[in-house]
Image: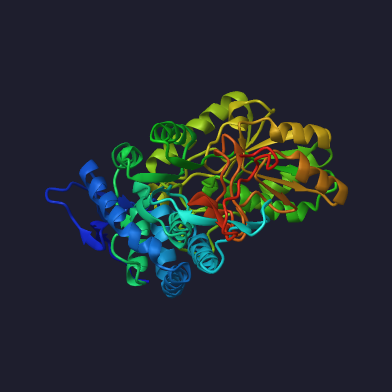
């Protein structure tokens, strides 16, 4: 498709606005260095305006029947499906993931929005029996109010839509602060919601830095819930400051995800899985396979298979369908990953890759080689989240050791085991400390109809996606209907009561 950079304002109260004297920043294509878009550097005053718009819009949106809200979401999904090719191309240009994954990012958005639209005819509460006669007991779900959605750059349409669609179907209004590096993707998503009939003020977009825009959102007392996906340290800060305002804070943070390869594994199947798990999205997924824990009986054979395949694995133009891996997302990402590779050289054995690609098209972008280290468990590269195409391989002697190694990190998002032993597979479902476990598949994410999230430093216990997604954005109200026409006192000794 043809492509041109555009200039965007903020989206506040149903209008695209550029504040007077606003400063601007640009996003760039990490493969070519070309400008993708120009955006406003949001200020605390801009956040106040956006929160005020969301606050004003809340009563009307709350009163809109949930099935009607679902109809609007279905229109969003329809329009996004028609725009999929263009929007997927923007994902690839702005973030750098290969085009199949860029399109997949958008498809995940579509799937989840459609799923959430259906929740508009459910939003289940529960009914329970009363201990008294002529009395009815039930729970209903109600929206929290104004929600701040703060999202990362690695899934620049999918993660925002996980939050936005779930918050909207449950009747909340939103101020959306995207990662600055993928602001064009965010603006295009908001455009589609606007065109689909979301009322003014219900969804607002403020671009800018986390230190300014994000902090202002967390501090505003009218924001009653914060949904944040990003790094652990930033997430911890958001959590602490949000708690000072007694806000609900939902965190989705990092991962150090293991694939366990047992001696009875289907090695060709595992090879495909490890390649995609470790080097898909250039390893820039919170669910990326960053650790490969291999039984000693198949260790040498499998590493040979893996390095042979990498010799034919293409790194290059992410818009070329034949490319296996595109650039990392930014100069900062490149610097951080190369720093970890340098560290790995001092504490492990470099088996493959380990360099920045140079020459030709590589000089315009941030291209790294897929990298493999053979290491012992406990090194920094085997424990810390690198968020790049770097795989640590650890040799183990049996299943128990493999599980011990897999669990002995600060994270618990996704996990995987390759085995033909059904008993061992079911043991792993129980034994692996993670929010997601795959059997005979890599540590990728979840399908939209299942909850997504993790334990330990991966988050603070909530889940996105699936029916659990609505729990993040709703309050439970208990309702008692007494139709006895007399005063009844529950849980009082009726024999001694006056």
Is residue 90 something that shows in the picture?
yes
Q: Is 446 displayed left or right of 67 in the figure? A: right
Give the image quarter of residue 257.
top right
Residue 192, above or below 137: below
Q: Residue extending furthest front?
A: 498
How is the structure coloured here?
rainbow
Residue 142 vs residue 8, the one in the foreground: 142
Residue 187 in sight: no
Quadrant where the N terminus lies?
Answer: bottom left
Q: Where is residue 498 in the image (x, y as percent from the top left)?
A: 61, 39
Observer-nearest of 399 and 306 = 399
Residue 349 found in image quarter: top right
Closer to the camera, 227 or 110? Answer: 227
Residue drawn where x is 23% and y is 50% of the image: 49
Task: Say above or below: 210 vs 102.
Answer: above
Q: Which residue is drawn at 76% across and 46% down?
A: 429
Residue in view at x 34 percent, y 63 percent: 60
Number of numbered discs overlaid on the protein picture: 0
State left or right for residue 294 relative to residue 11.
Answer: right
| Coordinates of residue 471 in the picture (x, y in percent) | 54, 51
Q: Is residue 487 above or below residue 16?
A: above
The image shows residue 475 at horizontal and vertical percentages of: 49, 50
Q: Left or right: 480 with respect to 216?
A: right
Where residue 396 appears, x then y in whole percent? Answer: 78, 33
Farthest residue to the left: give it. Answer: 21
Q: In which quarter of the image is residue 255?
A: top right
């Amino acid at each position: 498709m043809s492509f041109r950079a555009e200039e965007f304002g903020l989206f506040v109260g149903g209008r695209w606005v550029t504040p007077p004297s606003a400063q601007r920043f640009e996003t760039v294509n990490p493969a070519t260095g070309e400008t993708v878009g120009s955006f406003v550097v949001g200020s605390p005053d801009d956040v106040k305006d956006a929160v005020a718009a969301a606050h004003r819009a809340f009563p009307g949106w709350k009163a809109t029947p949930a099935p009607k809200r679902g109809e609007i979401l279905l229109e969003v999904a329809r329009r996004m499906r028609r725009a999929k090719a263009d929007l997927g191309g923007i994902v690839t240009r702005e973030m750098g993931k290969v085009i199949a994954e860029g399109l997949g990012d958008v498809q995940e958005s579509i799937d989840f929005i459609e799923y959430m639209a259906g929740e508009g005819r459910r939003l289940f509460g529960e009914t329970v029996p009363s201990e008294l006669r002529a009395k009815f007991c039930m729970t209903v779900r109600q929206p929290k109010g104004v929600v701040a959605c703060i999202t990362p750059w690695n899934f620049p349409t999918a993660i925002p839509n996980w939050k936005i669609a779930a918050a909207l179907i449950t009747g909340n209004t939103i101020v959306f602060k995207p990662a600055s590096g993928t602001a064009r993707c965010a603006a295009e998503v908001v455009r589609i919601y606007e065109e689909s009939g979301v009322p003014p003020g219900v969804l607002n977009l403020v671009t800018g830095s986390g230190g300014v825009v994000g902090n202002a959102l967390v501090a505003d007392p009218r924001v009653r819930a914060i949904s944040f996906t990003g790094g652990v340290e930033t997430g911890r800060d958001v959590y602490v400051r949000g708690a000072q305002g007694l806000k609900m804070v939902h965190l989705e943070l990092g991962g150090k995800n293991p694939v366990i390869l047992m001696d009875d594994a289907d090695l060709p199947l595992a090879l495909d899985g490890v390649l995609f798990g470790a080097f898909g999205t250039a390893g820039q997924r919170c669910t990326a396979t960053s650790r490969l824990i291999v039984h000693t009986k198949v260790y040498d054979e499998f590493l040979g298979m893996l390095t042979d395949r990498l010799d034919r694995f293409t790194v290059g133009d992410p818009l070329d369908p034949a490319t296996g891996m595109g650039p990392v997302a930014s100069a900062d990402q490149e610097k951080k990953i190369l720093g970890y590779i340098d560290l790995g050289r001092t504490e492990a054995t470099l088996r493959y890759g380990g360099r920045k690609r140079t020459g030709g098209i590589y000089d315009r972008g941030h291209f790294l080689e897929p990298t493999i280290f053979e290491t012992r468990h406990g090194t920094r590269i085997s424990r810390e989240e690198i968020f790049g195409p770097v795989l640590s391989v650890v040799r183990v002697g049996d299943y128990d050791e493999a599980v011990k190694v897999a669990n002995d990190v600060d994270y618990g998002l996704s996990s995987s085991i390759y085995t033909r032993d059904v008993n061992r597979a079911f043991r792993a479902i129980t034994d692996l400390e993670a929010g997601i476990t795959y059997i005979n598949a890599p540590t990728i994410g979840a399908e939209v109809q299942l909850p997504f999230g993790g334990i330990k430093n991966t988050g603070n216990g909530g889940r996105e996606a699936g029916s659990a997604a609505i729990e993040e954005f709703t309050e439970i109200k208990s309702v008692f209907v007494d139709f006895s026409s007399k005063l009844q006192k529950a849980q009082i000794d009726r024999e001694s009561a006056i």
